[in-house]
Image (tube, coloured by chain):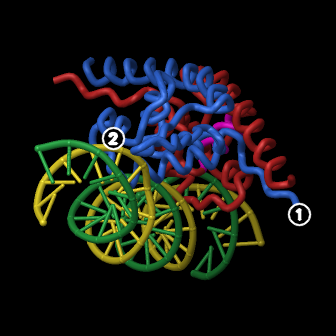
Chain colours: A red, B blue, C green, D yellow
Amino acid sequence: MIHQRECPVETLIHVLGGKWKPMILWQLIESNKRFNDLEKLIPDVSQKMLSQHLRDLEREGIVDRTIYPTIPPKVEYSLSEYGKTLIPVAEVMCAWGENHNKRKYKESAS
Amino acid sequence: MIHQRECPVETLIHVLGGKWKPMILWQLIESNKRFNDLEKLIPDVSQKMLSQHLRDLEREGIVDRTIYPTIPPKVEYSLSEYGKTLIPVAEVMCAWGENHNKRKYKESAS
DNA sequence: TCATCCCCTTACTTTTAAGTAAGTACATTA
DNA sequence: TAATGTACTTACTTAAAAGTAAGGGGATGA
Protein backbone atom coordinates (compact mmCIF):
# COMPACT_ATOMS: atom_id res chain seq x y z
CA MET A 1 0.00 0.00 0.00
CA ILE A 2 1.19 3.44 -0.97
CA HIS A 3 1.79 5.85 1.87
CA GLN A 4 -0.67 8.63 2.07
CA ARG A 5 1.14 11.84 1.15
CA GLU A 6 0.50 14.82 3.27
CA CYS A 7 0.16 18.31 1.86
CA PRO A 8 3.64 19.26 0.60
CA VAL A 9 3.60 22.60 2.40
CA GLU A 10 2.98 20.70 5.62
CA THR A 11 5.82 18.35 4.76
CA LEU A 12 8.23 21.26 4.63
CA ILE A 13 6.82 22.79 7.79
CA HIS A 14 7.29 19.44 9.47
CA VAL A 15 10.92 19.23 8.35
CA LEU A 16 11.80 22.79 9.43
CA GLY A 17 9.23 23.18 12.13
CA GLY A 18 11.02 22.26 15.33
CA LYS A 19 11.77 25.16 17.61
CA TRP A 20 15.55 25.05 17.02
CA LYS A 21 15.75 23.59 13.52
CA PRO A 22 16.01 26.82 11.53
CA MET A 23 18.79 27.96 13.85
CA ILE A 24 20.65 24.65 13.55
CA LEU A 25 20.48 24.80 9.77
CA TRP A 26 21.54 28.42 9.76
CA GLN A 27 24.66 27.45 11.68
CA LEU A 28 25.40 24.47 9.42
CA ILE A 29 25.04 26.56 6.26
CA GLU A 30 27.98 28.61 7.51
CA SER A 31 30.21 25.64 8.28
CA ASN A 32 30.29 22.14 9.70
CA LYS A 33 29.90 22.06 13.43
CA ARG A 34 30.38 19.72 16.35
CA PHE A 35 27.75 19.06 18.99
CA ASN A 36 29.46 21.32 21.48
CA ASP A 37 29.88 24.12 18.97
CA LEU A 38 26.15 24.11 18.26
CA GLU A 39 25.38 24.08 21.95
CA LYS A 40 27.47 27.20 22.42
CA LEU A 41 26.22 28.96 19.31
CA ILE A 42 22.53 28.41 20.00
CA PRO A 43 21.69 30.07 23.27
CA ASP A 44 19.17 28.29 25.51
CA VAL A 45 18.96 25.07 23.54
CA SER A 46 19.14 22.02 25.78
CA GLN A 47 21.27 19.00 24.94
CA LYS A 48 18.14 16.93 24.67
CA MET A 49 16.47 19.18 22.10
CA LEU A 50 19.69 19.63 20.16
CA SER A 51 20.30 15.91 19.81
CA GLN A 52 16.62 15.24 19.09
CA HIS A 53 16.46 17.84 16.32
CA LEU A 54 19.78 16.71 14.87
CA ARG A 55 18.46 13.17 14.70
CA ASP A 56 15.25 14.39 13.05
CA LEU A 57 17.24 16.29 10.43
CA GLU A 58 19.51 13.30 9.90
CA ARG A 59 16.54 11.00 9.40
CA GLU A 60 15.17 13.35 6.74
CA GLY A 61 18.53 13.31 4.96
CA ILE A 62 19.15 17.03 5.53
CA VAL A 63 22.11 16.68 7.85
CA ASP A 64 25.06 14.30 7.72
CA ARG A 65 26.70 13.00 10.86
CA THR A 66 30.33 12.04 10.49
CA ILE A 67 32.34 10.29 13.14
CA TYR A 68 36.09 10.73 12.88
CA PRO A 69 37.82 7.85 14.65
CA THR A 70 40.52 10.08 16.01
CA ILE A 71 41.56 10.15 19.64
CA PRO A 72 39.48 11.69 21.08
CA PRO A 73 36.80 10.76 18.56
CA LYS A 74 35.00 13.71 17.10
CA VAL A 75 31.53 13.95 15.64
CA GLU A 76 30.79 16.51 12.99
CA TYR A 77 27.44 17.64 11.66
CA SER A 78 27.11 19.10 8.18
CA LEU A 79 24.47 20.00 5.63
CA SER A 80 24.16 17.14 3.15
CA GLU A 81 24.07 17.82 -0.58
CA TYR A 82 20.34 17.21 -0.38
CA GLY A 83 20.10 19.53 2.60
CA LYS A 84 21.57 22.29 0.48
CA THR A 85 18.46 22.22 -1.71
CA LEU A 86 16.72 23.78 1.28
CA ILE A 87 18.83 26.93 1.12
CA PRO A 88 16.92 28.71 -1.68
CA VAL A 89 13.63 27.70 -0.07
CA ALA A 90 14.78 29.10 3.25
CA GLU A 91 15.83 32.32 1.52
CA VAL A 92 12.37 32.85 0.08
CA MET A 93 10.77 32.07 3.42
CA CYS A 94 13.19 34.35 5.16
CA ALA A 95 12.48 37.28 2.85
CA TRP A 96 8.74 36.99 3.43
CA GLY A 97 9.22 36.60 7.18
CA GLU A 98 11.47 39.65 7.40
CA ASN A 99 8.96 41.76 5.57
CA HIS A 100 6.19 40.46 7.80
CA ASN A 101 8.14 41.33 10.94
CA LYS A 102 8.70 44.86 9.63
CA ARG A 103 5.04 45.19 8.81
CA LYS A 104 3.99 44.10 12.27
CA TYR A 105 6.48 46.48 13.81
CA LYS A 106 5.12 49.42 11.82
CA GLU A 107 1.60 48.42 12.75
CA SER A 108 2.37 48.32 16.46
CA ALA A 109 4.30 51.61 16.25
CA SER A 110 1.51 53.57 14.57
CA MET B 1 11.23 49.43 23.42
CA ILE B 2 11.51 47.70 20.09
CA HIS B 3 10.01 44.24 19.89
CA GLN B 4 12.49 41.48 19.68
CA ARG B 5 12.23 40.03 16.19
CA GLU B 6 12.25 36.34 15.90
CA CYS B 7 14.05 34.50 13.14
CA PRO B 8 12.15 35.30 9.93
CA VAL B 9 11.90 31.65 8.90
CA GLU B 10 10.20 30.98 12.24
CA THR B 11 7.90 33.91 11.61
CA LEU B 12 6.67 32.31 8.42
CA ILE B 13 6.38 28.90 10.04
CA HIS B 14 4.33 30.52 12.77
CA VAL B 15 2.00 32.16 10.24
CA LEU B 16 1.46 29.00 8.19
CA GLY B 17 2.11 26.46 10.90
CA GLY B 18 -1.32 25.58 12.26
CA LYS B 19 -2.57 22.17 11.34
CA TRP B 20 -5.28 23.45 9.00
CA LYS B 21 -3.82 26.75 7.80
CA PRO B 22 -2.22 25.56 4.56
CA MET B 23 -5.49 23.89 3.62
CA ILE B 24 -7.53 27.00 4.46
CA LEU B 25 -5.26 29.17 2.34
CA TRP B 26 -5.31 26.67 -0.49
CA GLN B 27 -9.11 26.93 -0.55
CA LEU B 28 -9.09 30.73 -0.40
CA ILE B 29 -6.59 30.99 -3.27
CA GLU B 30 -9.20 29.33 -5.46
CA SER B 31 -12.05 31.61 -4.44
CA ASN B 32 -13.66 33.43 -1.54
CA LYS B 33 -15.43 31.12 0.82
CA ARG B 34 -17.95 31.21 3.63
CA PHE B 35 -17.47 29.52 6.97
CA ASN B 36 -19.73 26.67 6.04
CA ASP B 37 -18.06 26.17 2.68
CA LEU B 38 -14.69 25.78 4.35
CA GLU B 39 -16.13 23.37 6.87
CA LYS B 40 -17.41 21.18 4.06
CA LEU B 41 -14.29 21.46 1.92
CA ILE B 42 -11.84 20.63 4.70
CA PRO B 43 -12.64 17.19 5.99
CA ASP B 44 -12.25 16.61 9.72
CA VAL B 45 -11.69 20.23 10.71
CA SER B 46 -13.74 21.23 13.73
CA GLN B 47 -15.63 24.51 13.95
CA LYS B 48 -13.41 25.54 16.80
CA MET B 49 -10.16 25.03 14.92
CA LEU B 50 -11.55 26.59 11.77
CA SER B 51 -12.64 29.77 13.51
CA GLN B 52 -9.44 29.90 15.56
CA HIS B 53 -7.20 29.58 12.51
CA LEU B 54 -9.28 32.04 10.54
CA ARG B 55 -8.92 34.57 13.36
CA ASP B 56 -5.15 33.94 13.47
CA LEU B 57 -4.86 34.53 9.73
CA GLU B 58 -7.04 37.63 9.99
CA ARG B 59 -4.88 39.04 12.79
CA GLU B 60 -1.79 38.55 10.61
CA GLY B 61 -3.49 40.41 7.75
CA ILE B 62 -3.50 37.38 5.46
CA VAL B 63 -7.24 36.89 5.32
CA ASP B 64 -10.05 39.43 5.06
CA ARG B 65 -13.40 38.87 6.73
CA THR B 66 -16.31 40.62 5.09
CA ILE B 67 -19.78 40.73 6.58
CA TYR B 68 -22.59 41.34 4.11
CA PRO B 69 -25.57 42.80 5.95
CA THR B 70 -28.04 40.84 3.89
CA ILE B 71 -30.84 38.78 5.33
CA PRO B 72 -29.61 36.32 6.42
CA PRO B 73 -26.24 38.00 6.97
CA LYS B 74 -23.37 36.27 5.28
CA VAL B 75 -19.70 36.27 6.17
CA GLU B 76 -17.10 35.81 3.50
CA TYR B 77 -13.44 35.01 3.91
CA SER B 78 -10.92 35.96 1.24
CA LEU B 79 -7.18 36.24 0.74
CA SER B 80 -6.17 39.85 1.27
CA GLU B 81 -3.88 41.61 -1.20
CA TYR B 82 -1.13 41.12 1.35
CA GLY B 83 -2.09 37.47 1.75
CA LYS B 84 -1.49 36.99 -1.97
CA THR B 85 2.20 37.69 -1.42
CA LEU B 86 2.27 34.29 0.27
CA ILE B 87 1.35 32.46 -2.93
CA PRO B 88 4.82 32.40 -4.53
CA VAL B 89 6.34 31.46 -1.17
CA ALA B 90 3.87 28.61 -0.81
CA GLU B 91 4.71 27.46 -4.34
CA VAL B 92 8.40 27.19 -3.55
CA MET B 93 7.65 25.38 -0.30
CA CYS B 94 5.24 23.11 -2.08
CA ALA B 95 7.73 22.15 -4.76
CA TRP B 96 10.34 21.19 -2.18
CA GLY B 97 7.80 19.30 -0.10
CA GLU B 98 6.54 17.34 -3.10
CA ASN B 99 10.04 16.31 -4.03
CA HIS B 100 10.73 15.33 -0.44
CA ASN B 101 7.63 13.17 -0.28
CA LYS B 102 8.68 11.40 -3.50
CA ARG B 103 12.14 10.86 -2.11
CA LYS B 104 10.82 9.33 1.06
CA TYR B 105 8.49 7.11 -0.93
CA LYS B 106 11.34 5.80 -3.08
CA GLU B 107 13.44 5.23 0.02
CA SER B 108 10.76 3.19 1.73
CA ALA B 109 10.02 1.25 -1.47
CA SER B 110 13.61 0.17 -2.06
C1' DT C 1 42.34 8.54 41.87
C1' DC C 2 39.47 12.37 41.14
C1' DA C 3 37.92 15.78 38.20
C1' DT C 4 36.84 17.17 33.58
C1' DC C 5 35.49 17.07 28.66
C1' DC C 6 32.69 15.17 24.82
C1' DC C 7 28.37 13.40 23.11
C1' DC C 8 24.87 12.10 24.13
C1' DT C 9 20.28 9.30 26.55
C1' DT C 10 16.57 8.66 29.90
C1' DA C 11 12.84 9.78 33.03
C1' DC C 12 9.85 13.11 34.43
C1' DT C 13 7.29 17.66 34.26
C1' DT C 14 5.36 21.69 32.04
C1' DT C 15 3.51 24.06 28.20
C1' DT C 16 1.15 24.44 23.93
C1' DA C 17 -1.78 22.73 20.27
C1' DA C 18 -5.57 20.27 18.93
C1' DG C 19 -9.90 17.60 19.59
C1' DT C 20 -14.77 16.90 21.60
C1' DA C 21 -19.04 18.27 22.88
C1' DA C 22 -22.21 21.40 23.92
C1' DG C 23 -24.38 25.95 23.73
C1' DT C 24 -25.69 30.73 21.80
C1' DA C 25 -28.15 34.13 18.95
C1' DC C 26 -30.34 35.16 15.20
C1' DA C 27 -33.17 33.92 11.26
C1' DT C 28 -36.15 31.04 7.97
C1' DT C 29 -39.06 27.24 6.69
C1' DA C 30 -42.63 23.26 7.43
C1' DT D 1 -44.31 25.16 17.29
C1' DA D 2 -40.53 22.59 16.02
C1' DA D 3 -36.85 21.88 13.10
C1' DT D 4 -33.19 23.70 10.29
C1' DG D 5 -29.36 26.81 8.91
C1' DT D 6 -25.43 30.18 9.65
C1' DA D 7 -21.60 31.54 12.21
C1' DC D 8 -19.71 31.14 15.80
C1' DT D 9 -17.91 30.66 21.32
C1' DT D 10 -17.01 28.25 25.65
C1' DA D 11 -15.55 24.63 28.76
C1' DC D 12 -13.24 20.60 29.16
C1' DT D 13 -10.06 16.74 27.68
C1' DT D 14 -6.25 14.64 25.18
C1' DA D 15 -2.04 14.58 22.68
C1' DA D 16 2.22 16.47 21.10
C1' DA D 17 6.22 19.43 21.76
C1' DA D 18 9.46 21.34 24.67
C1' DG D 19 11.90 22.01 29.10
C1' DT D 20 14.46 20.20 33.38
C1' DA D 21 17.50 17.43 35.66
C1' DA D 22 20.20 13.75 36.09
C1' DG D 23 23.24 10.03 34.45
C1' DG D 24 26.48 7.16 31.49
C1' DG D 25 30.53 5.65 28.90
C1' DG D 26 34.56 6.73 26.96
C1' DA D 27 38.62 9.46 27.01
C1' DT D 28 42.44 12.92 28.97
C1' DG D 29 44.81 15.54 32.54
C1' DA D 30 46.44 16.83 37.51
Quarter of the picture holding the N terminus of chain A: top left
What label sits on residue A81 in the rendered view?
none
How many numbered tags mark residues here? Answer: 2
Instruction: Using the image as rendered, state which of residue A82 and residue B75 is in the foreground.
Output: B75
Disc 2: host chain: B
Q: Residue at position x 50%, y 37% from top?
A: B77
Name the secondary structure under disc 1. loop
Which is nearer the eye, A44 or B28? B28
Q: Is residue A68 left or right of residue A44?
A: left
Q: Indicate the secondary structure of the residue bearing disc 2.
A: helix
Asked if the magenta segment contains residue B96, the reply would be no
Residue A94 image point, x, y percent: 71, 33
Can residue B57 be seen here? yes
The chain holding disc 1 is B
Mark 1 belongs to which amino acid?
Answer: Met
Asked if residue A75 shows in the view, the reply is: no
Label 1 packing within 10 angstroms: few (<14), some (14-19), many (20+): few
Q: Is residue B22 left or right of residue A74?
A: left
Query: What residue is rendered at 53% in x and 50% in y?
Result: B55
Q: Looking at the image, is B85 positioned above or below residue C15?
A: above
Tag 2 residue: B39
* Residue at the image point whose x is 29% and y is 36% from the top: B40
Q: Is residue D11 left or right of residue B96?
A: left
**Residue range corresponding to the magenta coloring:** A20-28
Nearer the observer, A15 or B56: B56
Q: Quadrant of residue B104?
A: top left
Spatial separation of the CA atoms under disc 1 and disc 2: 41 Å
Of residue A33 and residue A18, the one placed in the foreground of this image is A18
Looking at the rendered image, the disc whose residue lies closer to the viewer, 1 or 2, is 2
Where is mark 1, residue-wise? B1
Residue C10, position as x, y percentages in the image: 36, 65
